[in-house]
């Protein structure tokens, strides 16, 4: 899934993102606005993960895993 598609479906995906990454607040998710880069950064910051780990999680999320 490319970044445009995440942005286009963000309203639908936002709830699923909150389920997967429960420590992200509604404000966090609103600020992300479907930006893959912003999502990766917030996951890194909130969960103390490396960029590679966060990227893998977002990749899996995009693939519906």
Image: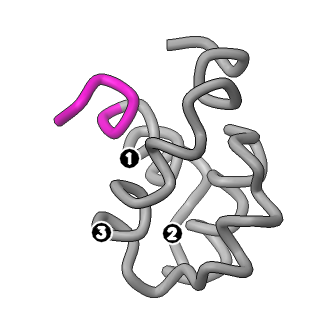
The reply to whether callout 2 and callout 1 are in contact (CB within 8 Å) is yes
Does residue 3 appear to the left or right of 65 in the view shown? right
Q: Is residue 40 above or below residue 49?
A: above
Does residue 65 appear to the left or right of 12 in the view shown? left
Locate residue 64: give its quadrant. Answer: top left
Give the label, 2 or 1, closer to the camera: 1
Q: Which mark is residue 57?
A: 1
Does residue 59 appear to the left or right of 50 in the view shown? left
Locate residue 4: give its quadrant. Answer: top right
Q: Residue most toward the right? A: 31
Number of numbered markers: 3
Q: Residues within 10 Å of mark 1 (few under 14, many from 20)?
A: some
- Work out whether mark 2 precedes mark 1 in sequence or the reverse, and give the earlier one: 2
Q: Residue at x 17, y 36 (%)?
A: 65
Q: Which residue is drawn at 46% across and 42% down?
A: 12
Read off the magenta span. Answer: 60-65
The residue that disc 3 covers is 19
Q: Position of residue 2 (x, y in %)?
A: 61, 12
Q: Which residue is drawn at 69% across and 30% down?
A: 7
The residue closer to the viewer here, 46 or 49, is: 46
Q: Position of residue 35 (x, y in %)?
A: 75, 40
Q: Residue at x 65, y 66 (%)?
A: 29
Q: Is mark 1 on a helix, strand or loop?
A: helix
The residue that disc 2 covers is 49
Give the label, 1 or 3, closer to the camera: 3
The residue closer to the viewer here, 1 or 49, is: 1
- Work out whether mark 1 precedes mark 3 in sequence or the reverse, and give the earlier one: 3
């Amino acid at each position: 899934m490319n970044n445009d598609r995440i942005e286009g479906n963000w309203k639908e995906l936002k709830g699923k993102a909150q389920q997967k990454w429960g420590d992200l607040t509604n404000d966090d998710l609103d600020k992300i606005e479907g930006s893959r880069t912003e999502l990766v950064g917030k996951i890194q910051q909130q969960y103390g993960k490396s960029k590679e780990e966060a990227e893998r999680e977002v990749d899996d999320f995009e693939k519906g895993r």
